[in-house]
Image (spheres, rainbow, N blue to C red):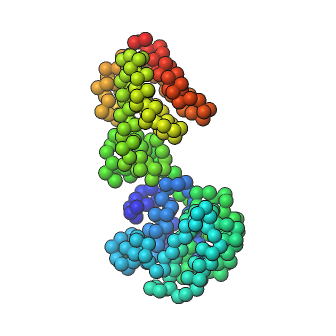
Amino acid sequence: MSWKTLEMNQPHVAKTITNSIRKGRVAHAYLFKGQKGTGKKEAALLFAKRLFCLTHVHDEPCEICVNCRRIESGNHPDVHLVIPDGNSIKKQQIEQLQEEFTKTAVESSRKLYIIEHADQMTVQAANSLLKFLEEPSAKTVAILLTEQFHRILPTIVSRCQVVSFHPLSTERIYAYLQQEGVARELAILAARVTNNVEEAYQLSQDDWFAQARKIVIQLYEALNKQYVQALLVIQQHWLTHFTNKEQMNIGLDLLLYLYKDLLYVILGEKQQIAYDDCISEFQRSRFLYCEKQIAQHMKAILQAKARLHTNMNPQLLMEQLVLQLREGSAFV
Ligand SMILES: [Zn+2]
């Protein structure tokens, strides 16, 4: 993540970092809270780079000086990262950190540490950290990261400046994916399927996702032809590709967005369309449906999504859905 991306995705976070440095008011401890994929760790590393950078331009770390590069590769002697050892962060890990910090900083007068998944500290580790936070050295900066803010001890929270990371909007994720060079047809769907930027990027890079999109289109085309053909797509492609609840949920989401597109075509709002390679198919099939039917079909897909949680047999679930998607259409 670059500084520019941080400014775009989490503007208030970029501002908080900039202001604390500019005004010489860097806190002893920060607590970055927010959902997975909101860029907390990346922001913490950018903060570290900005503090240690030798040639920063205004608020941005340069990314090329020796300090920026060593932080990037995890090799800076004065920047430490603590991650859970197995399922928890143990007391020894915090003690090691303290030991490290009692030595004077190797390269500069500052030291910074980042604790990832700070909520996974054991009680002993948290108490150990608390003591550390109670005797702050002017030159030490702590950044705690958490996706489970409610699990952090209030005594720790009270010693930190809390910085909130917001979930990204679909538009922001889409813009980010485009910036990363992801093809439009995948970026637009990946951004709709999840509000986790990391997950959206991974999906967009995964052949499975591109293939999922193809199968959804195949199913739609088959539905417009014959019931039997649609069942064949379910048997031969859908059930072998979407093999668990999570995957099924993504598949059903993709199908939902396809029907949404059909609605957009009928309403003449083509700029909203996700499946723009299907426009000619939409134009051909639009006369098979009226708006009300499309709304019913979307409702049926949402019901199928809800049924995923009832442990219904996936084949039965999809066959019922196919029946519903054929219902009331001009071709029955
Ligand atoms: Zn630099």
Q: Quadrant of residue 103?
A: bottom right
Q: Residue furthest bottom?
A: 104
Q: Quadrant of residue 294?
A: top left
The residue at the point 37 percent across, 30 percent down is: 217
Q: Is residue 311 above or below residue 126?
A: above
Q: Would residue 229 be seen by someone viewing this image from the given angle?
A: yes
- Residue 125 drawn at (x, y percent): 66, 71
The residue at the point 33 percent across, 48 percent down is: 182
- Residue 153 drawn at (x, y percent): 69, 65
Q: Is residue 41 above or below residue 219?
A: below
- Residue 62 drawn at (x, y percent): 35, 72
Say whether residue 258 is left or right of residue 103: left
The residue at the point 36 percent across, 40 percent down is: 210
Give the number of marks: 0
Question: For the N terminus, which image quadrant?
Answer: bottom left
Question: For the C terminus, which image quadrant?
Answer: top left
Which residue is more in the foreground, 23 or 119? 119
Say whether residue 135 is left or right of residue 248: right
Q: Would residue 159 be seen by someone viewing this image from the given angle?
A: no
- Residue 78 drawn at (x, y percent): 48, 80
The residue at the point 48 percent across, 76 percent down is: 79
Q: Is residue 324 above or below residue 200?
A: above
Which residue is more in the foreground, 219 or 282? 219
